[in-house]
Image: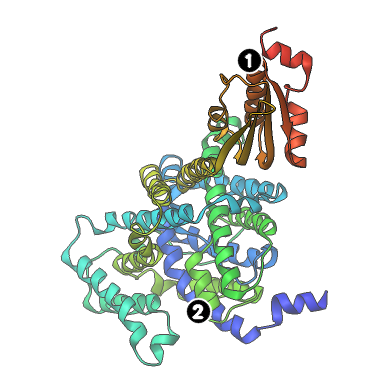
């Protein structure tokens, strides 16, 4: 136990503490910006980021991964907050956590293996587009000062890392916010600030049960949002875990991570925070800054709250243009620009899956719908492709008047018609042999196709012999097939 505690918490103390502080500094602008996207006070996102990061440090399945309020989740909350208010969002957050805990116990974390890379790319690209679109209201019907500040912010973000020494130490988004806030205060610019969006927290979060009626009507209101939040949160968390696994050459417990995300979201909702999940960008920052264990995640959440409580008077003066610049940077960094180049190199089916995922997400503003559409489409393309890897050859033995059909490949719902079309039922032969030693039968559609083939040959007066079924195929054929069961076969032949 002591060895496990050391490995998970204290094997990299200096690196984890420093990485956690860097992540906390970078979390502040994003937590505020994501709160504004969702249409709630900045303190809702800040409380959520603090609570989720601290809780997930103890109960999560992936050490060193950062979870907090995210853009993907915030985008799903906009309509709920606009139509029903903050209290219903808190209730939806609690239900989201319950769904995620259930998903963990049902071991749904392993389902990520069914999400193809093209779907993940489409998911990431759509997220980037939606984050960018969410910034457009802040850039519409504003003075030229806002455009100038936004452009200056982007210049600082992308050029500051090239400054010797300090450029590698301080996160450029934080430098952007500090410099633009100083300029706005010094010049007395009349532009929107974080303070205009709502009050920042000045106290520690307190236990807060959502002030909503506990009835079926409330459940029907929050249920669709909670399901979407749960799915998107787990998808982004599982994808982030995969990335961190690769970066650190370690493994994670996906199902424990599902449960951990659920517990963290319940904690967030009870402390006045919104739902969140793992953050791809912040997790990469943590790992590249030296964070490896749970201590880095705990440090990030704790230091975030300390800074908010101590520096609140300065945070309210941050110009919105600075946060817009940060979010544009996030969207640019999130978008997979290589996917555009790969459109010429990747197969058409892969490109279609990626593009459809993006289109559905952008059209519905729901990442879960896009991922579902992408997974279904990818499955159809895969089934169609595998269905083509089935061939039937035949040869006639004139001496015995026997036609032997040799089936090679996978027989299932997609290839069953091709399987049937490969037989010549009108050929006048006494014997037919169907050799299945190099074939595999996957489902009842395939078994049904075999039954039809055998029975059609028998109708034409041929003796049919089926050979070579492997153990798995023989099991499903024995269970569902009727060609070797006289009574059932007679029924299928119409009593002939």
The residue sitting at 59% across, 64% down in the picture is: 241
Q: Position of residue 357 (x, y in %)?
A: 42, 47
Corner quadrant of residue 173:
bottom left
As drawn, is 329 to the left or to the right of 204?
left
Q: Position of residue 402 (x, y in %)?
A: 67, 28
Q: Position of residue 210 (x, y in %)?
A: 58, 46
The residue sitting at 49% across, 56% down in the picture is: 117
- Neighbourhood count class around disc 2 (C-alpha, 10 Å): few under 14, some 14–19, many 20 upward: many
The quarter of the picture where the C terminus appears is: top right
Task: Please state which of residues 147 and 363 is positioned toward the viewer in this rendering.
Answer: 363
The answer, for residue 73, to whether it is visible in the render is no
Give the residue at mark 2.
Answer: 22
Is 387 placed above or below 192 here?
A: above
* Circle number at residue 274: none
Is 265 placed above or below 21 here?
A: above
Instruction: Give the SS element for disc 1.
Output: loop
Does the CB distance between marks 1 and 2 fall below 8 Å? no
As drawn, is 169 to the left or to the right of 11?
left
Is 65 placed above or below 356 here?
A: below
The quarter of the picture where the N terminus appears is: bottom right
Task: Please report whichever mark, 1 or 2, sits nearer to the chain's N-terminal start.
Answer: 2
Instruction: Give the SS element for disc 2.
Output: helix
Q: Position of residue 203 (x, y in %)?
A: 54, 66
Give the residue at mark 1.
Answer: 460
């Amino acid at each position: 136990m002591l060895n496990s505690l050391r490995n998970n918490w204290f094997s990299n103390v200096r690196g984890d503490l420093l990485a956690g502080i860097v992540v906390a500094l970078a979390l502040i602008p994003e937590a505020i910006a994501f709160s504004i996207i969702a249409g709630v006070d900045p303190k809702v996102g800040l409380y959520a980021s603090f609570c989720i990061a601290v809780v997930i440090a103890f109960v999560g399945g992936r050490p060193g991964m950062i979870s907090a309020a995210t853009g993907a989740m915030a985008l799903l909350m906009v309509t709920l907050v606009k139509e029903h208010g903050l209290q219903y969002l808190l209730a939806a957050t609690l239900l989201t956590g319950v769904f995620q805990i259930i998903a963990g116990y049902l071991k749904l974390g392993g389902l990520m293996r069914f999400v193809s890379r093209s779907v993940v790319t489409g998911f990431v690209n759509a997220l980037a587009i939606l984050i960018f679109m969410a910034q457009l209201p802040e850039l519409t019907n504003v003075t030229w000062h806002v455009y100038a500040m936004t452009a200056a912010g982007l210049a600082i973000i992308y050029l500051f890392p090239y400054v010797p020494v300090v450029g590698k130490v301080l996160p450029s988004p934080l430098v952007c916010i500090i410099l633009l806030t100083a300029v706005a205060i010094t010049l007395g610019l009349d532009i929107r600030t974080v303070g205009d969006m709502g009050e920042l927290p000045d106290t520690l979060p307190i236990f807060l049960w959502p002030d909503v009626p506990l009835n079926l009507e409330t459940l029907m209101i929050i249920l669709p949002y909670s399901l979407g939040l749960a799915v998107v949160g787990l998808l982004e968390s599982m994808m982030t875990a995969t990335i961190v696994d690769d970066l650190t050459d370690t493994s994670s417990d996906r199902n424990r991570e599902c449960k951990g995300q659920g517990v963290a979201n319940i904690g967030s909702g009870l402390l006045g925070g919104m739902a969140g999940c793992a953050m791809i960008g912040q997790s990469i920052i943590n790992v590249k800054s030296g964070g490896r264990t749970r201590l880095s995640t705990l440090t990030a959440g704790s230091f975030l709250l300390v800074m908010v409580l101590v520096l609140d008077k300065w945070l309210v003066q941050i110009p919105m243009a600075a946060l817009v610049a940060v979010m544009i940077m996030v969207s640019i960094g999130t978008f997979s620009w290589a996917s555009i180049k790969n459109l010429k190199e990747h197969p058409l089916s892969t490109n279609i899956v990626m593009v459809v995922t993006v289109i559905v997400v952008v059209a519905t503003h729901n990442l879960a719908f896009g991922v579902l559409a992408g997974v279904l489409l990818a499955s159809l393309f895969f089934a169609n492709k595998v269905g083509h890897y089935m061939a039937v050859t035949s040869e006639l033995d004139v001496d015995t008047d026997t036609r032997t059909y040799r089936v090679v490949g996978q027989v299932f719902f997609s290839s069953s018609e091709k399987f049937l079309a490969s037989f010549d039922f009108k050929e006048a032969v006494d014997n037919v042999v169907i050799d299945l030693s190099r074939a595999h039968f996957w489902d009842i559609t395939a078994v049904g196709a075999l039954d039809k083939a055998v029975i059609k040959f028998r109708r034409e007066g041929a003796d049919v012999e089926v050979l070579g079924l492997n153990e798995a195929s023989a099991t499903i054929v024995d269970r569902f097939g009727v060609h070797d069961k006289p009574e059932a076969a007679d029924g299928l032949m119409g009593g002939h």
